[in-house]
Image (cartoon, rainbow, N blue to C red):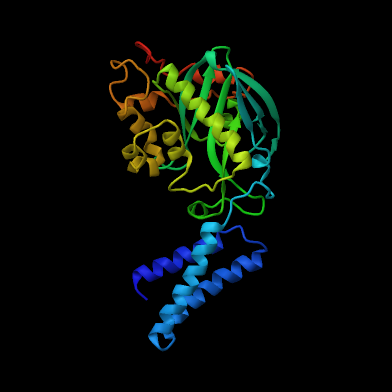
Amino acid sequence: MRMAGLAGVALGAGGLYYSTLMPDALRLGLTGGFVVVMVGARWLRPVWLARAGRVAVLGVYAAWYVTDPPRNDRDWAEEYAIPADAWRDGDVVHVRHVRNFRYRSESDYIPAWYDATYDLKQLERVDLVTSYWAGDAIAHVFLSFGFADGKHLAISIETRRQARFPYSTLAGFFHHYELFFVTADERDLIGVRTDTRRERVYLYRLNITPAVRERLFLSYVGAIHDIIAHPVWYNTLTDNCTTGILARAGARLRYRLDWRVILSGHTAAMAYDMDLLGPYDPARYPDFNALHAASRIIRPPGAVIDPDYSNEIRATLPPPEGPPAR
């Protein structure tokens, strides 16, 4: 079997193995059966029968895969069990189920949610957050919206994981995770990364106009509401934490296909090249490396996550200077 054929078998087997089919015996049996048929067909004679067999199996697989529906009624891991809902009423946005977990450790936490309202007229900042857990190439990327009254709402596009499955990076390339908007208090979404997991977390101010800020926020509001009735699949390549931000920001296609989107640890550098960060003082931060080093959130020894967490994490970060975008 040629390399293209082997790649096709691997993709098909991956699609079945990482599917949400139940029970597991069915999922594993179909995976093994697919490989056996596709590889074993090479010994069928005449040759046309082998080709016809493979085409038939691939046809059935393709028909199943494209009609396999995402769902909202699975047994979810606790952090994804309760989705947020959001809607606009005039200049006020209502958000139900803002997540605000309290973490004792990565696996020991107190679940909590609350409802909140946000005044569009007071939306004054959007921050880009990048969190690194291993190396510099890959980071989790999300946005946090800040309001003049001191409220912050962090929104992260993530995989919605079922309780029965451990997390798998490979699974994100197939129909394994539904897409989920973690809509959370900064003490939860950023705090678990800075104080519990001890990841390297960076925060940058986006240099966008008030109109773009509002449009971006409302695009999230609409998407959060839509997936309650119309769930969608997450995909590591086409609809992930970074591509979702760029799509909702209306970024040009060439940026949405940029290699730095896949290697998400470089997303902030791409935003810098697009003049989307700041404005920062060029004398103090003449290039992205200088800005990046200064934008890391540093938590002092013994720090605890308290009601003033959002102000505390920004206290030592570079202040945007110069005229704001208009």
Residue 181 seen in render: yes
Residue 36 percent coordinates (x, y): 51, 77
Residue at horizontal 61 percent and vertical 65 percent from the top: 27
Residue 107 visible to the viewer: no
**Seen in the image, is 324 located left or right of residue 87?**
left
Q: Nearer the viewer, residue 289 or 160?
A: 160
162 or 228: nearer the eye? Answer: 228
Whether 170 is drawn above or below 141: the answer is: below
Query: How many numbered discs?
Result: 0
Q: Position of residue 308 (x, y in %)?
A: 60, 17
274 to 41, vertically: above or below: above
Please provide percent x and percent y for residue 108.
Answer: 68, 39
Residue that lies at the very extreme toward the bottom in this rendered image: 45
Q: Residue visible at 48% across and 21% down?
A: 214
In which image quadrant can residue 179 be found?
Answer: top right
Can you give x and y, in whole percent of width and height, for residue 86 in the image? 62, 29
Which image quadrant: the N terminus?
bottom left
Instruction: Quadrant for residue 185, please give it.
Output: top right
Furthest residue to the front?
90
Name the residue rendered at 64%, 32% in the picture: 85
Q: In the rendered image of this protein, does residue 17 appear above or below residue 170?
A: below
Q: Say whether residue 173 is left or right of residue 85.
A: left
In the displayed structure image, the side of residue 216 where residue 160 appears, left or right: right
- Give the residue displayed 44% in from the left and 38% down from the top: 242
